[in-house]
């Protein structure tokens, strides 16, 4: 391949990468595809395009390009790591995990590979494995606030909140404007029942990112714990406006509305949930409770009937209502 063609491909990949970082995915993909027209054996172009397609959850097409990238450059840790993530995303978790371990062994100084491995471990429910991988990432990127925050979150998931809080504070010393670090700090403070400090941290997160899911949800919990149920309702309503398809948020909102005897708005939320998930114990219980508190006891017990005949944790509570 002559030097001019090689330069064209390099420039197209660089332009694509810049557009990719700017979130202009369609234009970035066009650059990568143009590079592949010039040379279908360019591993970087296949990797870049495959990674972009994976972000869009176009798994099969992403897999094809990443497999080609790895076949052309089998010792490139980044390519292996990206392929591993796609395999895991497609449900082939063990093969994905094996590839990520292989990538980490090939390039142990690559913080991004360790970060990818840690996130997969966390998704698998292995907080200790995620912590170990993020410690490796941290050794190679000591001043990366995102990696420090991720490490702290894995530690917090193991109920080691004082250690996690110290790390969140380190991350914020490096990047005071990192909303996720403030949000996760607020969660750990909340779990330690330091509600005043938790509220401050969560509100700081929301000044930086008004739609931060973790901050909005846990601010609602903090406000409930502080007895400020009206503001807690506002927090959950705001969260539901940002994430209208999240049933757990809708249920949280309904429960707090019930606790304030706002039965009608609670019942509206619970009717919606019950139509879509009539076998969820928690939805069934609180939907029945909204009916019970509204005076429609026969329908409440009709909704509760399956719970009363099962091993549901709500069975005893329903029996108490039946005795009233």
Image (spheres, rainbow, N blue to C red):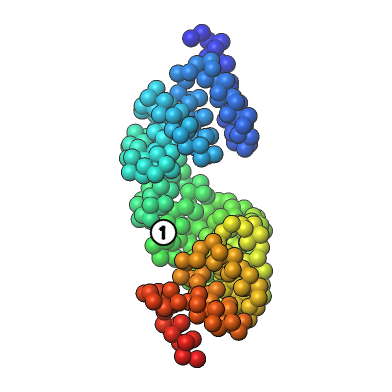
Q: Judge whether residue 113 can be spotted in this image.
A: no
Q: Is residue 313 positioned above or below 167 on the image?
A: below
Q: Residues within 10 Å of mark 1 (few under 14, many from 20)?
A: many
**Image spot of residue 313 (x, y percent):** 41, 76
- Choose between 86 and 180: the one closer to the eye: 86
Q: Residue at x 38, y 55 (%)?
A: 125
Q: Secondary structure at mark 1?
A: helix
Q: Is residue 233 positioned above or below 92 on the image?
A: below
Q: Judge whether residue 322 can be spotted in this image.
A: yes
Q: Residue at x 47, y 37 (%)?
A: 59
Position of 124 compared to 272: left or right?
Answer: left
Q: Residue at x 65, y 78 (%)?
A: 262
- In this rendering, the count of numbered labels is 1
Q: Residue at x 46, y 43 (%)?
A: 141
Q: Is residue 64 positioned above or below 210 on the image?
A: above
**Image spot of residue 235 (x, y percent):** 64, 67
Q: Name the residue at the top extreme.
A: 2
Position of 233 compared to 308: left or right?
Answer: right
**Image spot of residue 171 (x, y percent):** 52, 53
Q: Is residue 44 positioned above or below 200 on the image?
A: above
- Choose between 220 and 18: the one closer to the eye: 220
Q: Name the residue at the bottom extreme.
A: 324
In which quarter of the view is residue 80 placed? top left
Q: Which residue is mark 1?
A: 155
**Image spot of residue 200 (x, y percent):** 61, 67
- Choose between 84 and 148: the one closer to the eye: 84
């Amino acid at each position: 391949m002559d030097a001019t063609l090689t330069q064209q491909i390099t420039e197209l990949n660089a332009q694509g990468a810049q557009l990719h970082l700017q979130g202009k995915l369609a234009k970035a993909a066009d650059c990568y595809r143009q590079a592949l027209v010039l040379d279908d054996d360019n591993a970087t172009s296949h990797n870049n395009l495959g990674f972009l397609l994976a972000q869009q959850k176009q798994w099969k097409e992403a897999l094809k390009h990443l497999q080609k990238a790895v076949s052309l450059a089998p010792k490139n840790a980044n390519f292996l790591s990206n392929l591993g993530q796609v395999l895991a995303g497609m449900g082939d978790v063990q093969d994905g995990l094996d590839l990520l371990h292989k990538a980490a062994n090939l390039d142990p100084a690559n913080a991004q590979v360790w970060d990818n491995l840690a996130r997969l471990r966390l998704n698998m429910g292995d907080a200790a494995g995620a912590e170990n991988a993020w410690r490796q990432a941290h050794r190679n990127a000591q001043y990366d606030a995102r990696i420090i925050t991720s490490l702290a979150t894995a530690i917090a998931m193991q109920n080691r909140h004082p250690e996690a809080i110290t790390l969140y504070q380190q991350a914020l010393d490096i990047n005071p404007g990192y909303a996720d670090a403030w949000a996760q700090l607020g969660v750990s403070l909340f779990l330690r029942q330091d509600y005043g400090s938790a509220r401050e941290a969560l509100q700081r997160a929301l000044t930086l990112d008004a739609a931060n899911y973790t901050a909005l949800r846990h601010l609602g919990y903090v406000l409930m714990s502080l007895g400020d149920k009206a503001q807690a309702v506002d927090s959950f309503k705001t969260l539901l406006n940002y994430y209208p398809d999240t049933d757990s948020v809708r249920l949280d909102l309904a429960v707090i509305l019930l606790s304030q005897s706002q039965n009608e708005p609670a019942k509206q939320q619970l009717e919606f949930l019950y139509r879509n998930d009539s076998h969820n114990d928690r939805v069934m219980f609180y939907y029945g409770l909204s009916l019970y508190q509204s005076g429609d006891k026969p329908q409440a017990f009709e909704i509760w009937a399956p719970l009363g005949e099962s091993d549901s944790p709500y069975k005893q509570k329903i029996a108490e209502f039946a005795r009233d």
